Structures are given as C-alpha cells and as structure tokens.
C-alpha cells in the first residue's frame, strides 16, 4: 500500500481539466435554450474504477472525454441543468460497448462530483455526490471520498483525534472546517490495521477533496488523489 502523487501526475491532471472545460463549454452550448445562464450545474468527473482501464465518456450520445485514465479528476465545468445520459465505455469501443449507462438529473446552481466505480466482479456504476464548496472566512475545508473497493471502513485522525469515523465505500465524509496551516491526516483501513499519513498545506478559502482510489490488495494499489477548489470561483 503506498501513496502516489508525483508532480508529473498533477500537471497531467491539470491539463486534462483545462481540456475538459473547453470541450464541455462547447458541447453544452446547444442546450442554452433549455436552461438560462443562471441555471447551470457544475460537474467534475472522477475515474475510480480500477478494472475499467482507460475509458471514453459520452454525454447524450456525444463523446465528452477520450482516453480518461484511472485516478484522473477533472475540474468543475458548467452543464445545463436537467437530465443527461452518461455512458462510459472502454477506450475506442464506442457507446454501444458501455459498461456504465445511466441518466442523471442535475439541478441548477449545484456542484456535483460524479465518479465511475466498480470492479469486473461487482459490476460498474456511477455515483453522484452533491458538494458544498462554500467556506467560512479564514477557514479551509476538507472532505474525503471513499472510492476504494475492498478497503473496508476507514478512520481519519489528526493529532491523535479521530475526525472521521467508519467511512465506508461509495460514501463521502462530512466537511471538516479547519484553520489554514500544515496538517497530517492519518487514514486507517480498519479491517487491515494499516495507517497511511497524508501531509497537506491547507490554504484559506480552499476546499480540498481527498479521493481514496485503487485496491488495498491488488493492482492498481490504493492511492490518494487531492483536488483543490477555491471558493472565490463560486458565482
């Protein structure tokens, strides 16, 4: 079990998020007549299915993401409120080979994290989380998303005090509102008795999302992907 968070990986994901932003804005433009400029949802996508490999993502029949790799997280992008069909298929196979095919309904003014989940044995699914990116003055916020199949429940502690207890797969924790500064978050897989420390410098006005993805036993191994959102971006 180990933590992988290289500079190259961060840069690649940042570039991916910029590309997705441009593509989504272009893709959603034809829907402007069905939702006003003030009726947008904001969506980011997480690839947390270790068995799915590299995938393509389709929205309402059009390819949205190409070569979307495991562990990748996009930035938030505006999407017309309403119902949208989302399909996830193996890279290059087309929507007819989708392993995930669902319709989701998005509310205007709401932030969502949409995650591709599952394994070959359990089947694949899509899970949408509603996010709260508002931050109190002079504070930072942290939320943990447990997207690691087979890891069992996890606890998170800071300075010896448990701040998140018994977080299970396919669930996200409550938000922790903390003062800015350096922190070490100790994440413990309860069933395995293994603790992984995550050191982070939390800055005022930022919301930090910690995604636990991968496998405790098997490949790809468990890792933590951190996404940062600045609350000043909220309109």
Image (cartoon, rainbow, N blue to C red):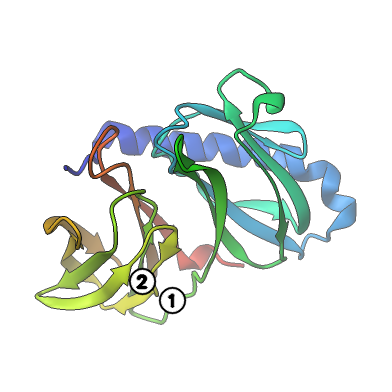
Is label 1 in contact with label 2 (beta carbons under 8 Å)? yes
Mark 2 sits on what residue?
Answer: 141
* Left/right of residue 144 with respect to residue 85 in the rendered view: left
Regarding mark 1 in the picture, which secondary structure is present there? loop
**Total numbered circles:** 2
Q: Position of residue 97 (x, y in %)?
A: 65, 25
Mark 1 sits on what residue?
Answer: 135
- The crowding category of the residue bearing disc 2, from other C-alpha atoms within 10 Å (few below 14, some 14 to 19, many at least 20), is many
If you read the primary sequence from the N terminus, does the residue marked by circle 1 or circle 2 appear first? 1
* Left/right of residue 171 with respect to residue 234 in the rendered view: left
* Left/right of residue 234 with respect to residue 197 in the rendered view: right
Query: Which residue: 25% across, 38% down?
Result: 221
Q: Quadrant of residue 176?
A: bottom left
Query: Which residue: 33% across, 39% down?
Result: 10
Q: Position of residue 64 (x, y in %)?
A: 65, 34
Residue 30, compared with residue 82, is above or below; it is above
- The crowding category of the residue bearing disc 1, from other C-alpha atoms within 10 Å (few below 14, some 14 to 19, many at least 20), is some
Residue 15, compared with residue 31, is above or below; it is above
Quadrant where the N terminus sits is: top left
Q: Quadrant of residue 186?
A: bottom left
Residue 130 visible in image:
yes
From the viewer's side, name the closer residue of 228 and 218: 218
Seen from this angle, which residue lies furthest top?
92
Query: Which residue: 41% across, 35% down?
Result: 70
From the viewer's side, name the closer residue of 160 and 149: 149
Residue 112, compared with residue 205, is above or below; it is above
Regarding mark 2 in the picture, which secondary structure is present there? strand
Residue 46 visible in image:
no
């Amino acid at each position: 079990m180990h933590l992988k968070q290289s500079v190259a990986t961060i840069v690649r994901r940042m570039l991916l998020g910029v590309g997705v932003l441009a593509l989504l804005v272009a893709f959603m433009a034809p829907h402007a007549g069905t939702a006003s400029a003030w009726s947008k949802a904001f969506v980011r996508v997480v690839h947390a299915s270790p068995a799915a490999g590299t995938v393509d993502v389709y929205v309402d029949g059009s390819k949205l993401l190409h070569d979307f790799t495991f562990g990748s997280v996009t930035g938030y992008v505006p999407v017309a409120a309403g119902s949208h069909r989302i399909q996830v298929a193996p890279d290059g196979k087309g929507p007819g080979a989708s392993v995930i095919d669902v319709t989701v309904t998005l509310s205007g003014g709401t932030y969502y994290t949409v995650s591709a989940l599952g394994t070959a044995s359990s089947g694949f699914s899509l899970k949408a989380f509603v996010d709260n990116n508002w931050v109190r003055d002079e504070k930072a916020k942290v939320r943990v998303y447990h997207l690691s199949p087979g890891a069992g429940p996890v606890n998170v502690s800071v300075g010896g005090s448990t701040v998140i207890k018994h977080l299970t797969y396919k669930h996200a924790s409550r938000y922790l509102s903390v003062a800015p500064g350096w922190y070490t978050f100790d994440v413990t897989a309860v069933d395995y008795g293994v603790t992984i420390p995550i050191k982070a410098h939390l800055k005022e006005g930022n919301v930090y999302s910690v995604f636990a993805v991968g496998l405790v036993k098997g490949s790809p191994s468990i890792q933590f992907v951190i996404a940062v959102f600045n609350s000043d971006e909220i309109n």
